[in-house]
DNA sequence: GTCTATATGGGGATAGAC
DNA sequence: GTCTATCCCCATATAGAC
């Protein structure tokens, strides 16, 4: 039962929220602890009291939503494998389960979802090894499970080819949720980045085509 | 004719080389001007004399190789369009021209190529708008030209669908050249990241499959 | 648990001699 | 063009009162 007068949970959450928004906007290096604590309505000392360091706060920001998202992906994968026949779930179902929860996360929490997605999309290629490895740690189990499932759905691919194709898939996903406005910036506002279901549909079509591409050249 | 005693061109190049290596390793924010100038064998004042600011130096690092790479892509595109019949170059040729020069750049200059690719791969989603826009400026013409060429090779796609698929393509490419070690880290050293020609072949197969994926679901 | 005040270090940029 | 020395700002982290 939290003390209503000075609730530590609220402070911690406020710090996470503020850090999430500012890191999404300015990057880890660009979001100073000062700016974060000011936005959270508190101060430097509180952040260090609750998280110990700036890096630990950044890690907490990533883990907070990634953990439930990954749990959902694994739950959906389990369900699909239970329902499927001997050959396992088909490719389209797998791709949907792999990208859907990540991309769609923005729906229930419009702002936070977008910010979080941006942070994760960038974190994969971030220079700071601590942060990258923290992200990898959260993802490792899911990647292993999905690799096995995709291998079953794509038996004609060599293990090496499969890993490369998963790399490309993750890249397309990461880049899209990181919200590089490259295409938009160059062509004007043609793309509706709010229609998450539409984006998932388009991405699934593209990725299924790429993952299932024949090995001898495709014309 | 440069003065052999104190050659400004060498200083400028040394600064660019040092900045390239350090920014690739630590990111723009993590690479201090002090570290860059020390590595280049010079000092803070020289960097500001030659480039005016740290940001301008970072922009110069991006432009130095990106400009020739893009020029080559456009040259290859021109050649392919000259050779092709009325329907324009086929999809596989276009994808090869789009990703080949970028990925293969690392061959002639092994270290610098890798560093530069990492920087570009990250720059697309970088928080700093100055840097992002600088990259976009360099890429804008090529993107426009390639969009038109892809539209001709993929007449069955709506303009919106095409732009999204190009976004996914750029993502797969950017993520791969940025060298996210995600897959490697999770599966051990299974992937040979030195075999650039092999990577291009695999990427082209994947992207052709994705770009040409049918619109109604792919099973 | 929360705050103010401070310790300590590093950053980018510049002045001015050579 | 190049250097040394310096200005000034902002960062993270902590000490210690409440």
Image: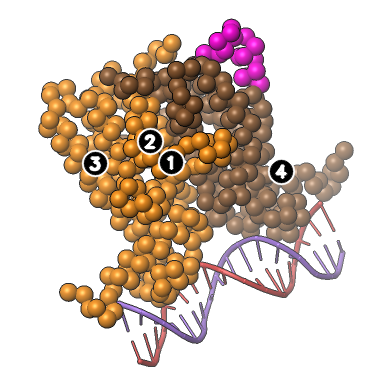
Chain colours: A brown, B orange, C red, D purple
**Which residue is depicted at the point 12% across and 30% down?**
B83
The label shown at residue B73 is 3
Asked if residue A83 lies left or right of residue A50, the reply is: left
Q: CA distance from mark 3 to mark 1?
A: 22 Å
Task: Classify 10 Å Cα crowding around label 1: few (below 14), some (14-19), many (20 and above).
Answer: some
Q: Is residue A12 magenta?
A: no
The label shown at residue A13 is 4
Establish whether labels 3 and 2 are both on one chain. yes
Q: Position of residue B72 (x, y in %)?
A: 22, 44
Task: Classify 10 Å Cα crowding around label 3: few (below 14), some (14-19), many (20 and above).
Answer: many
Task: Classify 10 Å Cα crowding around label 4: few (below 14), some (14-19), many (20 and above).
Answer: few
Task: Classify 10 Å Cα crowding around label 2: few (below 14), some (14-19), many (20 and above).
Answer: many
In magenta, the rendered stretch is: A75-90
In this rendering, the answer to whether B117 lies above or below B214 is below
- In this rendering, which labeled residue sits more in front, label 4 or label 1? 1
Figure quadrant of residue B18: bottom left
């Amino acid at each position: 039962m939290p003390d209503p007068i000075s609730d530590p949970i609220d402070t911690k959450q406020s710090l996470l929220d503020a850090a999430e928004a500012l890191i999404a906007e300015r990057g880890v290096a660009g979001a100073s602890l000062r700016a974060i604590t000011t936005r959270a309505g508190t101060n430097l000392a509180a952040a260090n009291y609750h998280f110990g360091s700036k890096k630990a706060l950044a890690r907490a920001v990533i883990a907070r939503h990634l953990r439930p998202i990954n749990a959902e992906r694994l739950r959906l994968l389990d369900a699909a494998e239970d329902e499927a026949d001997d050959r396992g779930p088909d490719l389209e179902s797998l791709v949907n389960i792999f990208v859907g929860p990540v991309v769609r996360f923005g729906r229930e929490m419009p702002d936070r979802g977008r910010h979080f997605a941006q942070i994760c999309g960038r974190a994969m290629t971030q220079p700071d090894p601590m942060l990258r490895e923290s992200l990898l740690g959260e993802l490792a189990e899911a990647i292993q499970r999905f690799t096995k499932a995709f291998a079953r759905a794509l038996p004609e691919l060599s293990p090496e080819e499969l890993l490369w194709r998963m790399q490309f898939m993750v890249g397309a996903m990461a880049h899209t949720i990181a919200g590089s406005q490259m295409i938009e910036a160059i062509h004007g506002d043609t793309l509706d980045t709010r229609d998450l279901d539409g984006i998932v549909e388009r991405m699934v079509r593209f990725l299924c085509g790429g993952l299932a591409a024949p090995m001898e050249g495709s014309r």
